[in-house]
Each structure stands twice: as structure tokens, then as C-alpha cells.
Amino acid sequence: MRVITLDKNAQVEAVVTESVVESFSPVAHKAYHEMADKPVVEVDALTQLHANLEMLQDLQTRLAFVMREVRYLMKV
């Protein structure tokens, strides 16, 4: 049987490897846009999220407009 005694006052030295450092860097995704001037674009995840949210907001307002027009035409 082994008894392990720990010194709580001892200093612990942290070793940081390259893989740990790379995991904290922002994630970049490559996107392919066929009709664009630059077909392959690399954007970090947060920027892509903001762009997707803006696009969803635009599409939602357009759909709301179309639905309003359809309801108006159905009443006539």
C-alpha cells in the first residue's frame, strides 16, 4: 500500500502545449460561394454567426411582407 502526501503550499507549474493554445484561438470556417469573386472565403465563427443572423432577420421580414400581402388578397 502506498501513501501519498501532498504539500498544499507547493507551487504548481503549468505546462501549456501548442494544442491547448490553438484550442483557444477563434475557429475559422471556409465557405464556398460559387458566384462570388473569391469563391473560397475564410471567416471566423462569430462573424459568420452575425452574418447569418442578419440574413435570417432580412428573410423573416420579407416573408412577413409576403404573408401580409397573401392575407390581404384572400380577404378581397
Image: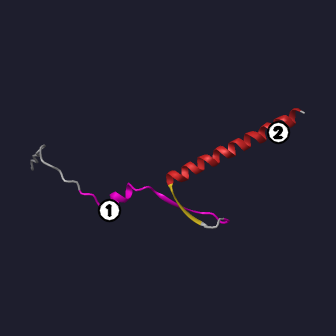
Q: Is residue 62 left or right of residue 51?
A: right
- Residue 13, horizontal then vertical, whole percent: 19, 53
What residue did someone put label 2 on? 70
User: From this viewpoint, which residue is outermost toward the front?
Assistant: 37
What residue did someone put label 1 on? 18
Q: Is residue 3 left or right of residue 43?
A: left
Q: Residue at x 32, y 62 (%)?
A: 18
| Relative to 14, residue 68 above or below | above
- Residue 4, horizontal then vertical, whole percent: 11, 48
Kindly indicate whether the residue at mark 2 contacts the one at mark 1 (C-beta within 8 angstroms).
no
User: Residue 17 in magenta?
Assistant: yes
At mark 1, the secondary structure is helix
Q: Amino acid at mark 1?
A: Glu
| Relative to 26, residue 54 above or below | above
Closest to the observer, 17 or 44: 44
The magenta segment is 15-35
- Around disc 1, counting alpha carbons within 10 Å, would you say few (fewer than 14), some (14 to 19), or many (20 or more)? few
Q: Earlier in the sequence, mark 1 or mark 2?
A: 1
- Residue 65, horizontal then vertical, whole percent: 76, 40
Exactly how many numbered labels are in the figure?
A: 2
Q: Residue at x 64, y 67 (%)?
A: 37
The quarter of the picture where residue 73 lies is: top right
User: Residue 31 in magenta?
Assistant: yes
Q: Quadrant of the C terminus?
A: top right
